[in-house]
Amino acid sequence: MSESIDVTGRLRKMPVEAGDPVAYNLAIGDSRITLNDLIGHRVRLDFDGVIRCIHCDRTTKKSFNQGYCYPCFRKLAACDSCIMSPEKCHYHLGTCREPEWGEANCMVEHVVYLANSSGLKVGITRATQVPTRWIDQGAVTAIPMLRVASRYLSGLVEVACKNHVADRTNWRAMLKGDVPELDLVQERERLLGLIADDLAQLRAQHGEDSIRSVDEASLGLGYPVQVWPAKVKTHNLDKTPEVEGLLEGIKGQYLMLDTGVINIRKFTGYEVRFRVLD
């Protein structure tokens, strides 16, 4: 390397940028390290045993919901159960933990999409999070299927879709790179036909314009990977605070080392030291 890299700070979710391939940065404290340039180099990540909440900055013995202390986990709307199950949104009942946060994040346009990460799956995301959400899931292709008025409504649509298609990614298969090719335009039309009655009922309840079909093209995504792991072994900073290996690739929110993979997002809020060893 032309210059040494040795930084210390609190770990955050990796910022990404769509490109060919996807561009990754490692966010540690105020530092942003261009990771694509480090493919093929030996790196080391050391956890010093301190976890700090990404919201209130207090020290916590355990991270909840990828970076929060327990009090914040209990009180923040971003940590409510309806974030994982949007069909359970209770904003309309007047019981949202943080109504202003709900207005900004839930009562806005969402996209119901199909993605191919480890096979066909359905998902939802805020319209402003396309294509970041797809990249974080390691999708090789993705396509918008519907645009809906709120997170709650997108959750109801997703529930209808889950009767016909998975809503989870097999992350081990995603990291092995053995993802089957799919025609997402064809799959979109097939699924829309299967849920036509459900959509008609939801539109009757919430308004015709609350759910809009779209004719948007699919997006292909490539990742900076030199070597796909034949067997996926995971690193866990809670059990082994020193992780070292040759960086062979990056996909989703995973660093792929010759010694195993590590989900960076899982350890958000952890105080770490990151070094390039060669």
Image (cartoon, helix red, strand yellow):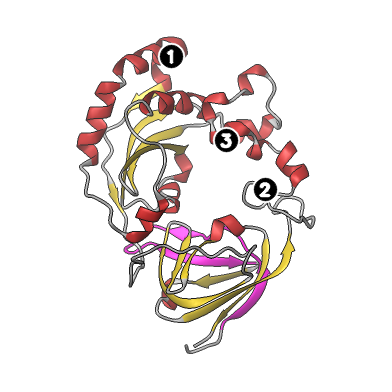
Picture quadrant of residue 75: top right
- Closer to the chain start, of discs 2 and 3, is 2
Rendered view: 187 above or below 56? above
Amino acid beneath label 3: Ile
- Rendered image quadrant of residue 158: top left
Question: Mark 3 — residue?
Answer: 83
Looking at the image, which residue is at 33% across and 49% down? 118
Mark 2 closeness class: few <14, some 14–19, many ≥20 residues within 10 Å: many
Q: Residue at x 40, y 55 (%)?
A: 172
Q: What range is drawn magenta here?
A: 5-28
**Secondary-structure class at tag 3:** helix
Kind of residue at disc 2: Phe
Image side of residue 83 versus residue 49, left or right: left
- The residue where tag 1 is placed is 207
Q: Earlier in the sequence, mark 1 or mark 2?
A: 2
Q: CA distance from mark 1 to mark 2?
A: 37 Å
Give SS at disc 1. loop
- Look at the picture and state if 97 lies above or below 172: above
Residue 100 spot, x, y in % from top left = 68, 32
Label 2, label 3: how far apart the Cα atoms are: 14 Å
Disc number lying in front (2 or 3): 2
Q: Which residue matches tag 2?
A: 64
In which quadrant of the rendered view does residue 53 lie?
A: bottom right
Q: Is residue 47 left or right of residue 39?
A: right
Q: Residue visible at 33% across and 67% down? A: 228
Residue 8 magenta: yes
Kindly check if marks 1 and 2 are in contact, taking CB atoms under 8 A apart as contact.
no
Mark 1 surroundings within 10 Å by alpha-carbon count, few (fewer than 14), some (14 through 19), many (20 or more)? few
